[in-house]
Image (spheres, rainbow, N blue to C red):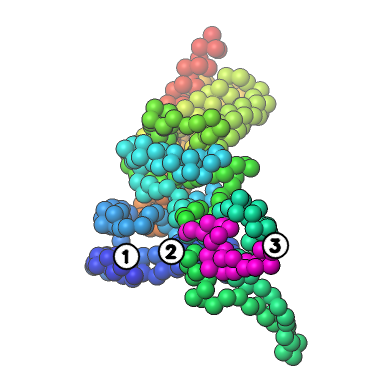
Amino acid sequence: KNIETMILKHPEVEGTVSRIGRPEAGSHPHPVNFAEIQVSLKHPEGRIAGAAERARIVTELRRELQDYPGVTLNFSQPIQNSFDELLSGTRAYFALKLYGENLDVLREKAEEIRKAIAAVPGVVDLSVEQNYGQPQLQIELRHDAMARLGVTGREVMQLIESAVGGENVAGIYRNTRRYDINVRLGEEFRSTPEALGKLKIRTASGRYVDLDQVASLKITEGPVQINREKIQRRWTIQGNIAGRAPSEIVRDMRRVIAEQVKLPPGYLVEFGGQFENQERAMQKLMVVVPIVIALIFILLWMSFSSLRSSLIVMINVPLALIGGVLGLAVTDQFLSVPAAVGFIALLGIAMQDAVVMVTDFRDLCKEGMPLAEAIRRGSAVRFRAVILTTLTTLLGLLPLLLSTGIGAEVQRPLAAIVVFGLSSSTLLTLFFLPALYYEIERRFSR
């Protein structure tokens, strides 16, 4: 409620909705000490807040709430938050997973890693998994006293279990329902270690002694839960990125961890989260895309029966990349999976235009028309078709490029690459490709 009150002070905030704890269906792996606050934003003038305004509000909230005691924050979009959680089990862009055996060492090294990467530019919402601080009743048996009095460890555990947890003594039926009757000590006899220490336990001689004579009882702190992954205990350090390319931030994080954190033998750090999925997807694309381009080249060679014509069409691939890279630079986007998909779509459209142009040139030359005249006639005939194909694609993707609403961070890289890349590719296809085709064919005809 205190955090909601601070959020609602901003004039751009229309309202907040909070969800606390764990859903009944268990569809999300939320712990019980988790709260999700969804914030609705609207510009004071009535229009929906844009991307720049949302980024400014998030920056202000991050500054105001970062020192709230006992709370770690993570800012995200609702759909993106759900995808991150379902894909990697974390609710942030990246997660450093520390594996090892001893929980105390994991906790200590996780804090060292957090302090080391906190200074990396572009890392925000950094937090360590809050998995410690659960009050626990610890019972240490005094084996020398137990041996002297003739008390077994099993008897001590049974006494504590029945006193604190209770014991099922009977059942009762009410119509078709059965209810268990559970009996345990009253609150005042089991609420503190001192009270439990006064419980009586029977010795081998038949007399009763206090429980604290054969066992030491105290309240300690322990882990809330023990997370495991890959058959190892795991501690997570998570965070988001802002203002820099993910690959640069991860490279800097790897460097500072190697320089400042010394891990004992058997302990290792692994990068996970959305970055892990993106890295895996990019590695697959680096293999798939060259194979696809090679297959396209083979199909062109089989269609044209000419190595020269096939290579001329393939020249459009780097020409299209020029505009795509320029689009990322102009719109200040980073290379991501949506951007890679945009490059694939761009290459397909660019090569289609080149195939149309080269096919017309070859057909006109086969009809007996001189090379220069065939290129001029073919370029004029196909000019309108190429321009219309480009314009329909550009106009269709323009709303995605200009969008600033929820989900725009996925749409804009794809749209920017296709729009800018197709613009440069079309100009080069209409003017550079005919000149290149004329020069190559003229030289080979000699």
Q: Horizontally, is 409 left or right of 149 in the view?
A: left
Q: Could you tell me which secondary element the residue under label 3 belongs to?
A: loop
What label does residue 35 carry, if any? 2
Image quadrant of residue 44? Answer: bottom left
Q: Which amino acid type is marked by label 3? A: Ala
Residue bearing mark 3: 204
User: How far apart are the two marked residues, 3 and 1, measured between alpha carbons?
Assistant: 59 Å
Give the mark, 1 or 2, whose residue is nearer the N terminus.
Answer: 1
Q: Horizontally, is 407 left or right of 140 in the view?
A: left
Q: Which amino acid type is marked by label 2? A: Ala
Q: What residue is shown at x 51% (from left), y 12% (from top)?
A: 443
What range is drawn magenta here?
197-219
Q: Nearer the viewer, residue 438 or 126?
A: 126
Residue 82 in sight in this render: no
Disc nearest the viewer among 3 and 1: 3
Q: What residue is shown at x 36% (from left), y 57% (from top)?
A: 70
Give the mark, 2 or 3, whose residue is nearer the N terminus.
Answer: 2
Task: Give the x, y percent position of residue 291.
Answer: 62, 29
Q: Which amino acid type is marked by label 1? A: Ile
What label does residue 267 carry, if any? none
Q: Nearer the viewer, residue 363 or 390?
A: 390
Can you say whether 358 is above or below 202 in the image? Answer: above
Q: What residue is shown at x 41% (from left), y 69% (from top)?
A: 18
Classed neighbour count for the residue bearing mark 1: other residues with Cα under 10 Å, few (<14), some (14–19), many (≥20): few
